[in-house]
Image: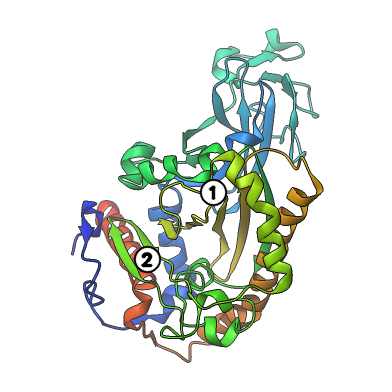
Amino acid sequence: MNIHSGTIQATDDPEVLGTEPIPARYYYDPEWFELERKAIWMRSWLNIGHVCELPEPGSFVRREIEFAHASLLIVRGKDGEIRALHNACTHRGTQLTSEPCGKQSKFSCPYHMWTFGTDGELISAPDFERFYTSKESCALKQVSVDVCGGLIFVSFEPQESLREFLGPMADMLEQVASSQATTFHEYVYEIDANWKLDYDNFQENYHLRFIHPNTAQSGIGGENPFGYPSSFSLYGKHRTQTIWTNPEGEFTPTTGLAFQKSMPRLQADGLLDLPHPREYLALFPNFFMLCSPGNNFLHYVMPLSAGKSRGVIRIYWKGEDETASTRFAREYGMAITRDIHSEDVNVIQAGQRGLSSGAIEHIHFMEKEILCRHLIKVVEEAVEAYRKEIA
């Protein structure tokens, strides 16, 4: 099956991708990880931020991208354009700033004071006349960057445009709440687990009943004790599933209060009637978003090594915290998110330890873990294509 064709696969056949077990070494083998790094991570479009972080010319954020050994400055220039610049002076490679974000009209290297504009061009360098080069040839190196639905994506070696890469998912991203977002809450974590093992935990609901019996009450119970999704769709490299909600589920008193506090603001902002209210959008290789009414829960996972990853969780909002009630509701939303995630960490890391021991040769996915299987199929196809390319 050519997953990269971009066609939408059947949504009612759990065996559309086969039923065979998956090699366990994909989750710990350093040689396989290096193939993924070159075939997938260097070539894919990756979300690294949102336009609300760059509100005006000179605004910037710094992103460390370990798999590429790169530090990037995502900058809005004087012309309003967003650029991704390598945080490396073109004289001797010294990083220009260690600040995580800010606003600057220029970037000066602390080593020899080479100074660059927000467009990456070299403005000045002491005694530059004695160098055997031109200012034009000393501009900061750039990485491809583009925006969809307010989300900023970068790619080190793009094989296609962002919209070509996203396919029909691009239209979905432009229709959800994050496209209107002006602020967000963020939670960053590191975990001793392969990026796929960490990511897979959030692609299946088989574990909810056992790991989240209290915090996920609205998503399990009754006729669906495991909280399996209602349906799924496969869009080439990407995928979606529709989240099932227990019609008899009950909020805890605090959750109910937070929901009540948030309703007036969500209604005023017109965020309750946006499309895809119960959809889980998964972009290859490492991104997913829950399109909850009024806000978007976004999570992406970056690889640090074969057995270690960094996750970024964000909840996007429209408008500032104008009232105490709004702030309470939003802060509580992130608090419960962190509570749920804290229940996952130990079992994910325990899984990594077991896999890394080499004791298990294969992983067995069941029919409701088809999103996990789809990710592996796309990874396998990308790695195989890369192997043929370099052979």
Looking at numbered disc 1 in the image, what kind of residue is underneath it?
Answer: Ala
- The image position of residue 363, as x and y in percent, is 39, 84
Q: Farthest residue in the bottom direction?
A: 359
Is there any visible trace of residue 127 in the rendered image? yes
Q: Quadrant of residue 39?
A: bottom left
Residue appearing at x 56%, y 80% in the figure? 352
**Label annotation for residue 68:** 1
Q: Is residue 384 above or below residue 212?
A: above
**Residue at the (40%, 61%) spot, across then down:** 35
The reply, left or right, for residue 201 in relation to residue 258 is left
Residue 245 percent across, percent down from the top left: 47, 71
* Residue 136, quarter of the rendered image: top right
Q: Given the current orientation, which residue lies at the most extreme left position?
A: 1
Q: CA distance from mark 1 to mark 2?
A: 21 Å
Binning the other alpha carbons within 10 Å of mark 2 as few (below 14), some (14 to 19) or many (20 upward) gives many
Identify the secondary structure beneath mark 2: helix
Given residues 227 and 155, the one toward you in this image is 227
Give the position of the C terminus as an image quadrant. bottom left
Q: Secondary structure at mark 1?
A: helix
Seen from the viewer's position, the closer of residues 339 and 275 is: 275
Compared across the picture, whether 68 is left or right of 264 comes to left
Instruction: Select label 1 or label 2 by which is in front.
Output: 2
Residue situated in front as seen by the camera: 172 or 322: 322
On the question of residue 87 being in view, the answer is no
| Mark 1 or mark 2, earlier in chain | 1
Percent coordinates x, y for residue 299 in the rendering? 56, 58
Tell me which amino acid carries mark 2: Leu
User: Height in image: 384 above or below 209?
Assistant: above
What residue do we see at 51% from left, 78% from top? 248
> Can you identify the residue that label 2 sits on?
375
Residue 16 appears at what percent x and percent y? 21, 72
Q: How many marks?
A: 2
